[in-house]
C-alpha cells in the first residue's frame, strides 16, 4: 500500500474522499468488439464510484474469440434507414451490417 498504509486505513481514506468501492460477484465477463469477443472467466470485479463516475476493474482468466461476431439487424431498423437515406431496403441492410448495426452511422454512410 502507498505510504505504508494498511488496507483498512486506505478504505477509510477513500470513503472520506467520496470514493466508493464494491466487489461484484461475477461468474464471467464478456466484452463484445466489432471483430472479436473477449471472455474473462473466474473474474475478480471491483466497481469504483468517483464523483458519480462508475469504473470497473476486472482481472481473471482471459481468452479471445476472433472472427465475425454476429449482430441481429431488425427489419424495423432496415426500414427506418432506407426511409431516412432514401435507398432500397437491400442497400440499407448492407449499410447496417457494415456499420455493425449502428443506425446513425449507416444513414450517414448512405448519404455521402
Image: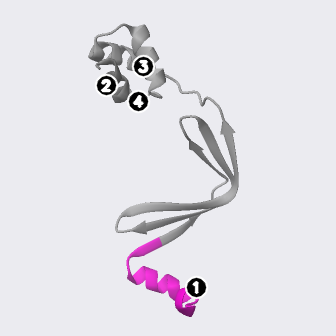
Q: Quadrant of the N terminus?
A: bottom right
**Reading the chain from its start, which is encountered first: label 2 or label 1?**
1
Residue holding disc 4: 102
**Reading the chain from its start, which is encountered first: label 3 or label 4?**
3
Q: Quick one: label 3, few (<14), some, or many (20+) residues within 10 Å?
A: many
Q: Report if residue 8 lies within the magenta region.
A: yes
Looking at the rendered structure, the secondary structure element under dot 2 is helix
Looking at the rendered structure, the secondary structure element under dot 3 is helix
Residue holding disc 3: 95
CB under 8 Å between discs 2 and 4: no
| 52 or 58: nearer the viewer | 58
- Camera sees residue 43: no
**Which residue range is magenta in the image?**
1-20
- Camera sees residue 49: yes
Q: Residue at x 42, y 19 (%)?
A: 95
Q: Report if residue 71 lies within the magenta region.
A: no
Instruction: Estimate the spatial distance between the alpha carbons at disc 2 and disc 4, rounded to whole Å.
Output: 10 Å
Horizontally, is 72 left or right of 80 in the view? right
Residue holding disc 2: 108
Residue 89 x %, y %: 40, 9
**Reading the chain from its start, which is encountered first: label 2 or label 3?**
3
**Reading the chain from its start, which is encountered first: label 1 or label 3?**
1
Q: Quick one: label 1, few (<14), some, or many (20+) residues within 10 Å?
A: few
Q: For the view shown, which residue lies furthest in the bottom direction? A: 4
Q: Quadrant of the C terminus?
A: top left
Instruction: Estimate the spatial distance between the alpha carbons at disc 2 and disc 3, rounded to whole Å.
Output: 10 Å
Looking at the rendered structure, the secondary structure element under dot 1 is loop
Residue holding disc 1: 1
Instruction: Estimate the spatial distance between the alpha carbons at disc 1 and disc 4, rounded to whole Å.
Output: 44 Å
**Reading the chain from its start, which is encountered first: label 2 or label 4?**
4
Circle nearer the viewer, 2 or 4: 2
Amino acid at each position: 500500500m502507498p505510504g505504508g498504509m494498511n488496507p483498512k486505513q486506505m478504505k477509510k481514506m477513500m470513503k472520506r474522499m467520496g470514493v466508493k468501492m464494491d466487489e461484484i460477484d461475477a461468474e464471467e465477463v464478456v466484452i463484445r468488439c466489432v471483430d472479436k469477443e473477449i471472455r474473462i472467466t473466474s473474474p475478480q470485479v471491483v466497481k469504483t464510484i468517483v464523483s458519480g463516475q462508475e469504473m470497473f476493474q476486472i482481472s481473471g482468466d482471459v481468452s479471445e474469440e476472433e472472427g465475425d461476431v454476429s449482430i441481429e439487424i431488425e427489419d424495423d431498423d432496415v426500414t427506418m434507414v432506407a426511409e431516412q437515406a432514401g435507398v432500397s431496403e437491400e442497400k440499407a441492410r448492407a449499410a447496417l451490417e457494415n456499420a455493425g448495426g449502428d443506425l446513425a452511422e449507416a444513414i450517414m454512410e448512405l448519404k455521402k
